[in-house]
Image (cartoon, grey):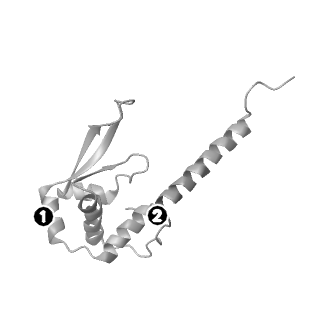
Amino acid sequence: MGRLAGDSIARQQARTWKKRVDQAREDKARWGTLPAAPLAVLGAARRQMALLWWLCGDVGPSATVGARGLPPLTPDMRALIKKGYLTLARHSGYMPLNPSRRDNVLTITPAGQEALAAAHVTQAEKAYIIAARMNRMLR
């Protein structure tokens, strides 16, 4: 008996593996060289203020989370939401081909802006958050 037309299961798995490897290489090329992973974890208050700086102080008044290629909604982000420094809202996607897609958007509140203005985020804390994000260690 002959084989059915098409690729075998092993060939299909090899192709999906190759696609994942190619995607990882593209991601590395896009980011350039990664900074070294943080060796020590900051305290919760310092880490959350640095995260608030990174989410809203550097990028703008809002940031999308939970989508492919973006950071997930982490416990520290949830703590900032509970403190009233951020709000979480779901907005419809901006892709015309997929109108049912919804994005999670974090927006800084006036209380968060005041807390960020009062906090002094050092360069070391900023470097920690950026390195944690790029190494996928964001907490």
Instruction: Please give the name of the residue rendered at 54% of the width and 53% of the height, measured from the top-left corner.
Output: 26
Measuring from the top left, give residue 54's x and y in whole percent: 29, 63
Label 2: which secondary element = loop
Residue 137 visible? The answer is no
Measured as percent of width and height from the top left, residue 10 is found at 73, 39
Residue 130, relative to residue 110: is it above or below? below
Residue type, label 2? Asn
> Is residue 14 shown to the viewer in this render?
yes
3 vs 83: above or below: above
Q: Is residue 69 above or below residue 47?
A: above
Q: Which residue is mark 1?
A: 114
Question: Which quadrant is home to the C terminus?
Answer: bottom left
- The mark tally for this picture is 2
Element at label 1:
helix
> In the image, is 10 to the left or to the right of 99?
right
Residue at the image position 34 percent from the left and 52 percent from the top = 73
Residue at numbered disc 2? 135
Task: Locate the N terminus and report the quarter of the image it occupies.
Answer: top right
At label 2, counting other C-alpha atoms closer than 10 Å, the crowd grade (few under 14, some 14-19, many 20 or more) is some
